[in-house]
Amino acid sequence: MWLSDPARSAPLDLTAHPHRQMLLLKLEFSICLASMDRRFHSLIQERSHAGPAQEGRLLDQIPPSEYQDLVPNSPFGAQLGYQFANRKGGPLLQYLQSRGIGRWILLHFHDLFRATDDIKGPHVVFASATGFAPGSPQFHIHVPVSAVLSPPLQERQAILESTFKFLYVPDIGGKPIRVSGTYGEDGQDPYRNLERLVHYLAEPGPDSKSILERDFDQYQGRLPALIVNSYAQVDHVQKVLQTIPFWHDKTIAMKSDAESDPIMAWETGATDSTIRRGEIERLREKGKKLPIFPLLAFQRGYNVLDDQGKALLGSAYFLVRPFPHPDDASLPVIGVNAYTIKEMVPEWIVPASYGDSATEMIGTLRRHAYHEWMRQMPSSQKEHGLQGMANDLYDQYLWDQFIIMWQACLRFFRGGRSANIYFVDGAFHPMNKTRSTLKGWIRILDDYLAPTSTKDPFDRQLVEALYGPAHLALKTLEKELP
């Protein structure tokens, strides 16, 4: 390349630079990417033609064309580009596109025809209880709550009668075995640590039965479930269990709908040890087997019931603490959009303090949003993981992950049945770290439910109605934490 040719005049002298070869390699990669970009955009522009041939799976996620004009741009413009990530399986180049603030449509759908026809509507009803999660950028809806549909008293009582426990699984040094957040740390392998947790639960004990086997027999017809963070972890856990004689043919792993052939899904023997995500409500038809789920695919939208219409699942083992992937660019997008909406409620206009003119106000909003974007990016942290998060971003993480976890737990209490909830990954409560996810969940709920809380009384009532049982269960668990 001309930059490395001493006979040519280059704008930068890299001859003695300590990272010369890496810089040249990055420059070469960027030039190739720029060349590819034009061709790639041609492909994106033809996505409507490519869609049917690809079974509707497109390379980017954009609003339907009917709604694109209704979605306001992100405060610092449309986000479009590429992300290069070093993954364990090899480098990954991702195409990223975010066209605007999608939640704006939800919050303003009722004003759709007001400007043109002076008509109210279409009316919108938000019926998800987790739409009120005041610290969560992912789940909270900035609309005043009009009513609370109370759960059956027997389900609330069932939660109070359930067991919530941090299951301490020690390594050879006596510390809890951690899965989440261990990749690249002191030579640890998260998949190897996951195997160790599975063996601890599934290998026979002194009474010739394993922890899972005793749980398997404890309830009449109810099943324990193993919960991990991804379909890859589901497959790995199932392979480990299949090496243990008792569990060889007694597991069933959830597969994404994209991985399974719906025609073959229920053919005898074709998927005897797997079940599609869309068929999970028919789990009882698979017999007495140990199900393995990825958390995000199981958390909401499905009820796994027995023939009596009550919870089929009796115990939850969270083998991996939920944590967003460092390369997931969707969370900073969600964070910036949530920040923008929060800045504009309740009047839904840019605050007057942002400037004296529309141009100045939009410029200020853009600068603030860009600052928030950079702050949300994992690469801006001085330390990776929870320890490197700013306090307010850590609280947002706690709210997001609490909602995800709690939605999954509620599947186990359907019909007023109690259940056992076990947090197995040592990362839920690392003894040598300053931030414990379990204690963090208790703290964010204490902010509203503790006697000394200074939050708005109405918000406190809502949190009590929605998450009060979870708070009591976690407070009981806290007493037993090492």
Image (spheres, rainbow, N blue to C red):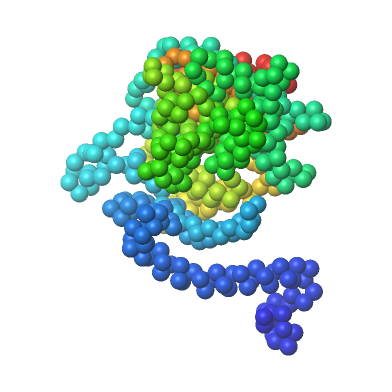
Q: Residue 327 appears at what percent x and percent y? A: 58, 50
Q: What residue lies at 65% left-to-right and 35% top-to-bottom? A: 243
- Most foreground residue, 48 or 478: 48
61 vs 427, left or right, is left
- Most foreground residue, 370 or 43: 43
Quadrant (top left, top right, bottom left, bottom right) of the C terminus: top right
Q: Which residue lies furthest to the front in this view?
A: 268
Quadrant (top left, top right, bottom left, bottom right) of the N terminus: bottom right
Note whether 439 is above or below 255 in the view shown: above
Can the viewer see residue 388?
no
Q: Residue 121 appears at what percent x and percent y? A: 23, 39
Q: Residue 377 appears at what percent x and percent y? A: 59, 49
Label count reads 0
Q: Residue 432 appears at what percent x and percent y? A: 76, 32
- Most foreground residue, 315 or 449: 315
Q: What residue lies at 71% left-to-right and 43% top-to-bottom? A: 189
Note whether 304 is above or below 159 in the view shown: below
196 vs 423, left or right, is right
Note whether 442 is above or below 114 in the view shown: above
Can the viewer see residue 213?
yes
- Most foreground residue, 238 or 476: 238
Q: What residue lies at 55% left-to-right and 29% top-to-bottom? A: 250
